[in-house]
Amino acid sequence: MPEPFRVTLDIRTDDLDVNGHVRGPAYLAYADHARWECVWAAGVDPLVLKAENLGPVNLETTIRFRRELRARARIDVLTRFTWEPGKVSRVVQEFVAPDGAVVAEVESLSGLLDLESRRLVADPGQYWRKYAARPEILGLARIP
């Protein structure tokens, strides 16, 4: 299994709730940011996808809170794509504190939408592989 893609983030005070913990929507924003950084690192240009009438979509997202995450913390978000038969893929993201503890996990079930038919494409990995200069970052093997 390939190494996950890593992004380091600083926790912002405006992402905190009244108890001083990171709010749930902030975790989702951090996860989205890290996922897009991963896609860009793989060499996929979102504008090219759109020009080809394709758009990534999240179908389901789950947050699992493991430990407190508070202001001024620095975390790594580890992103790993897994590809399943059919029309979906999974993105698992771990939020890791400097001491190595996993403070949260965000798991998303995703697809690639044909923007004309408004339907998910079959085997989305083949499209990501086509548009990625480094598909291995997305957990996809290169085609020889």
Image: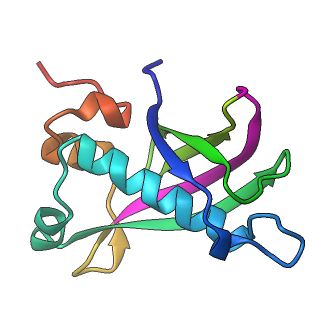
Q: Does 133 appear above or below 87?
A: above
Q: Main secondary structure of the magenta part?
A: strand
- Relative placement, left or right, of 43 versus 41 is left
- Relative placement, left or right, of 17 versus 25 is right
Residue positioned 64% across, 62% down in the render: 27
Question: What stretch of residues is rendered in magenta?
Answer: 99-112
Where is residue 115? Give x, y as percent: 25, 78
Residue positioned 45% across, 22% down in the render: 3
Residue positioned 73% across, 69% down in the render: 24
Where is residue 72? Give x, y as percent: 67, 55
Q: Does 137 appear above or below 70?
A: above
Q: On the image, which quarter does residue 138 sit in?
A: top left
**Which corner quadrant holds the C terminus?**
top left
Instruction: Name the foreground residue: 44 vs 10.
Output: 10
Where is residue 118? Give x, y as percent: 33, 80
Q: Is residue 42 visible in the rendered structure shown here? A: yes
Instruction: Name the foreground residue: 122 vs 52.
Output: 52
**Is-magenta flag for residue 105?**
yes
Q: Does 19 appear above or below 7?
A: below
Residue positioned 31% across, 43% down in the render: 125
